[in-house]
Image: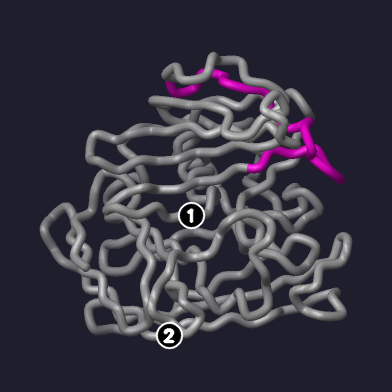
Amino acid sequence: MKRKAKDTLTAIEMDRGETEEFELADGRVVRIELLSTSAQVINTTLQQLKTGEEAGRTDYRFDCTLRINGHEHTLEREVSTQRSFYEPWEIEGVHIWLDAVDDIFDFLSETHGPCRMNRGRGESGYKQARLALQDSSLRICPDRMHPWCPLPEGGLKIEDCYRGEDCWLGAYNGASAHGGLDINHPPGTPLRAPVDIDDHFYFNSLEMGHNNNRWRGIRRWPNGAEWILQAHHMTELTVREHTPIEKGRQFARGAGVLSGAADHSHFVFKIHDYGETILLDPWILFWQMYKDRDPAHNNPSG
């Protein structure tokens, strides 16, 4: 498929052998082909993979090999170590975030929030890699971002993601890929709009009879892309539903509802564009928030 870099992040999912042509702001076209993917367990406390144990832990790595303008590049990630909070690669003028590969579901289930790729042609029936792309001369969105919650000094720390495992795709109880990013903080912690929000509402709430308060905010960008932001375990809303929220305004108090072993808020990020909705690591938003809070800040990945 051929796409032109927008002033907002582009999310893509690929099958092996598939090619993406990504046109930069200066007109250059970067050709990206997915050659291979793999994933391996680094360590686990489980007796049997995919069978969770209370406070169980599984750390793993995954990678993909891309042919970019004729040159091969292997990108590798780790989850749930501190390396979960990573810097994007910059190759041929493109920032590339390697979000996921389908191989991780050889040893993880998907029972703790949606996080798998959309349907594809692979043996598993799902797309085989998920990437986020942006022209490296552009930000992930045209507006400076406001912190969604108070940003921990020195960057996010994996030990502050619930019990130290619940970053994006972290293995909850050692067995299930986590469909969000947890950040531990006290009940009542203020949550603020990271960008202007066009519409927002609870899609689950205690008042509706659910076991949790789960919020969704929508940002419709002028370029046609739509960002879907979610926060769960919320104590209460402070802005009436279905009203716009300007960037930086407090819209809720976080944590405190169904938060389990550690009070935390759970963050979710999706992009709807080109007729499909793709989930991405909320870390990408926090990466930009750290950059925007202090351009001279040390590497936000710690």
- What type of secondary structure mainly makes up the magenta span? loop
Depth check: give the residue in front, 219 or 163: 219
Q: Residues within 10 Å of mark 2 (few under 14, many from 20)?
A: some
Q: Quadrant of residue 246?
A: top left
**Residue 137 place in picture, x, y as percent:** 27, 51
**Residue 181 place in picture, x, y as percent:** 63, 49
Is 300 situated left or right of 162 in this image?
A: left
Q: Pointer 2: what residue?
A: 36
Depth check: give the residue in front, 217 or 10: 217
First to last magenta residue range: 246-266
Name the residue at 56% across, 79% down. 103
Residue at the extreme left of the image, as rendered: 27
Q: At label 2, which amino acid type do we have?
A: Ser
Q: Is residue 256 above or below residue 273?
A: above
Q: Pointer 1: what residue?
A: 280
Name the residue at 78% across, 31% down. 256
Name the residue at 43% across, 30% down. 195
Q: At label 1, which amino acid type do we have?
A: Leu
Depth check: give the residue in front, 221 or 115: 115
**Residue 295 place in picture, x, y as percent:** 45, 39
| Element type where label 1 sits in the image | strand
Q: Is residue 259 magenta?
A: yes
Name the residue at 80% across, 76% down. 44
Q: Is residue 122 above or below residue 234?
A: below
